[in-house]
Image: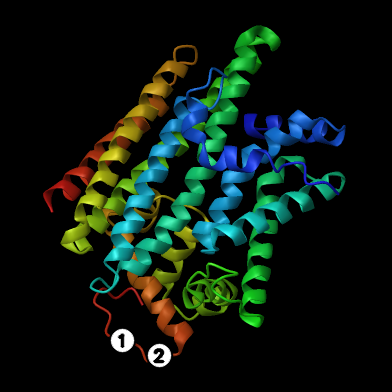
Amino acid sequence: MARRHDATAPDATFDLVGRLAEPGVTPASGTAVALVVEVALSLITKAASRSAATWAGSGGVLAQADNLRERVLRSGDAVELSYVAAMEALAGESGEGVLEERLRSAVEALLDLATQAETTAELAAETSTGCDPAHRADATIAALFCDAAVRACAHLVELNLTTTPDDRSTGELRLMIESVRASTSRALSE
Amino acid sequence: MSAEAEVVVSLVARCRSGDQDAWAQLVRMYSRYVFAICQQGFRLSDADAEDVFQDVFVRVYEHLNDIRDDASMRAWIGQVTRRLCLDRLRAAKRSPVTEDEWEAPDPDDALERVELAMDVDRMMAELSENCAEILDRFFRRDESYAVIGNALSIPAGTIASRISRCLRRLRELLEGRPKSTQPSGET
């Protein structure tokens, strides 16, 4: 059987940043946020792995970062797909009930991504506390990226909520913003 | 059905009817996920990850008509990818290649991960209830630190370090080493 996917692999995997600039509907902001959290996880991995000789907790951090990376990939895809579905509904191909449901799905996907960013920020703070001080900056920057990611998710949720009023999501996000701010402060104070 | 599932089901249906664009979109959608499992999860080299990537999507293409639940495509692709990564690591263990042929990952590290995955059920039972629950919630149920903290009445800011300690204990059990001094009582 011919391998029909040869042309897509390098593009999809290594050129996401380039594709973000293209005029298509996706990838868009939500995907960019997921990418930022992935970058944060890579920085955490770098700081932890370079501290392995002096920090007993480095292996645990690496395992947690691996797990979170898979969650973020999953979450980023869900954000992108739910956005496409919402845009299709907005274009008038579905009824109002479907539109509301798809916007709700888009919000849920963003909440999940924000949750992963919040958890990653805490892992960054933990790494900043325990890692070799020579590599602390990587962990601190990771926390700052996550701070930005949670705020970005909150903004995107606000945009979606213009047609589906729901205080629960904004309340959850407010708590996440506070939580990630505390993690970032901890990382910065080391 | 979630919006993601709806899109996937629609894509798979188009793939089955021979729509090349749909196939390209499906591969693009899951390619980063597959590479992440290969490279981050199993530490395969770029060349091995590329081979596994090819094999995964050949298998997906060949079995498109056999998939019972299209909405579960991601889970199925993840499962296929992990299995092929394990095969690749086992093959590497049986037939070591030269440096010219293969940019080898650290075999100890990679195989340790595989063995950990295979033995984890047995070893989890030997951990303390607290440790087993924290690891189960984080690694199997994909819960956040905040959710774990709320459920177990533990500050969320301490979960990451507790997980690390529990993993160290798990590693000790796997390696059959004597129990070390535990500072937190998590074991």
Quadrant in which the C terminus of chain A is drawn:
bottom left
Q: Amino acid at mark 1?
A: Ser
Q: Amino acid at mark 2?
A: Arg
| Left or right of residue B128, residue A99 in this image | right
Q: Chain of mark 2?
A: B
Q: What's the CA distance linking mark 1 and mark 2?
A: 8 Å
Give me the residue at 56% from left, 77% from top.
B115
Secondary structure beneath label 2: loop
- Residue corresponding to mark 1: B180
Give me the residue at 42% from left, 23% from top.
A157
Q: Quadrant of residue A153?
A: top left
Label 2 crowd bin: few (<14), some (14–19), many (20+), radius 10 Å: few
Say whether marks 1 and 2 touch (CB < 8 Å).
yes
Give me the residue at 40% from left, 70% from top.
B131
Q: Mark number for residue B177?
A: 2
| Left or right of residue A126, residue A109 in this image | right
**With respect to residue B10, does B59 lie above or below?**
below
Secondary structure beneath label 1: loop
Where is residue B18 shown, x and y percent of the image? 86, 33
Label 1 crowd bin: few (<14), some (14–19), many (20+), radius 10 Å: few
**With respect to residue B51, does B125 lie above or below?**
below
